[in-house]
Amino acid sequence: MSGFGPNPWIQRHWDWRAAANFVFGGAGSGLILAAALALPLGPARAVSLPLGLALVALGLTCVWLEIGRPWRALHVFFNARTSWMTREAFAGIALFGVTVAAFFRPGDWMEFVLGFFALLFAWCQAMILRASKGIPAWREPKVIPFILATSLGEGAALAVVLAVAYNMPSPLAYGLLAVALLARAAAWMVYVASVAPKLRGAPQAALVAVTPVLLWIGTFGALALAALAAALPRHFAMLLALAAAAAAILAGWHAKRTLVTRASLNQGFSLPNLPTRGAR
């Protein structure tokens, strides 16, 4: 499964550092989006914005550390016409600027702009995978709704924790969490049904093995804990909200890490017409 040529192999260029960009960047942009959609103005929302930016920055730092020549990272800004990584970088800069502005000058129109750029960043991350044509698990169009749904689900889980921590009940945050996690589960099932038959061996097994973790722990378990958190007094709710967030977020991170590092089977290439010595 290793090597380079016509036979399929597991890509090794993107390791845990590249996966961390999708892990932390997705959760950070999802938190900012969830804050714009569901958190009322107050301490919980105020904390969510810098926390979201910190997660996005951590993800981008991890992928920067993966570059063989990290001080040439500015070259990423030179290919906006063709590269989704370049578009992700520009979306990240815009997200930072808009989030800082929304922190100091919140308002209805600013919430719309904030949500738009958070969604744009997550969309760029999904399209980075979609544009990798040689890897069946990445190029599948159905990966896009999964990446978007898991980003929002992880962000909504963090938003619920912040709402409980600051004693700011937010039914919208709980509702957003339920919708996002159920949408993520559905998107994953559709995605795996489409991609798994195109893989084989360990990559296929790794992808399929994610499903029970994502469904039973990351979806149904997380939603059950969140429902208890919404129903019980605050000193119980905090522990339950943390457990629900951990279940939802870690399951999503597990799925993304598997997708990037273990299910990334490169299909190889074919040479249908080979030159023959002496032939005309």
Image: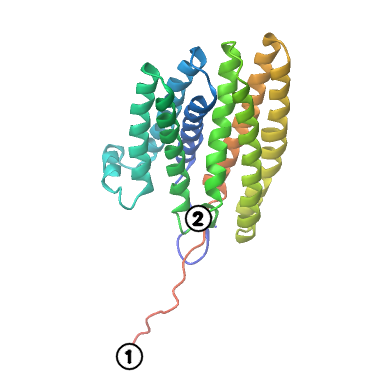
Query: Who's the residue at 66% across and 34% down the image?
Result: 218
Q: Is residue 17 visible?
A: no
Residue 133 position in % (x across, y down): 46, 58
Q: Amino acid at mark 1?
A: Arg
Quarter occupied by residue 155: top right
**Image quarter (top left, top right, bottom left or bottom right) of the N terminus:** bottom right
- In the image, farthest residue toward the front: 108
Looking at the image, is 10 positioned above or below residue 154? below
Looking at the image, is 217 positioned above or below residue 3? above
Q: Is residue 111 visible?
A: yes
Label 2 SS: helix
Residue 86 position in % (x across, y down): 33, 44
Viewer-proximal residue among 275 and 246: 246
The residue carrying mark 1 is 280
Quarter occupied by residue 21: top left
Q: Amino acid at mark 2?
A: Arg
Q: Residue 173, which numbered label? A: none
**Front tag of 2 and 1:** 2
Label 1 SS: loop
Looking at the image, is 236 positioned above or below residue 153? above
Query: Who's the residue at 39% across and 39% down the image?
Result: 66
Query: Who's the residue at 47% across and 43% down the image?
Result: 15
The residue carrying mark 2 is 139
Quarter occupied by residue 272: bottom left
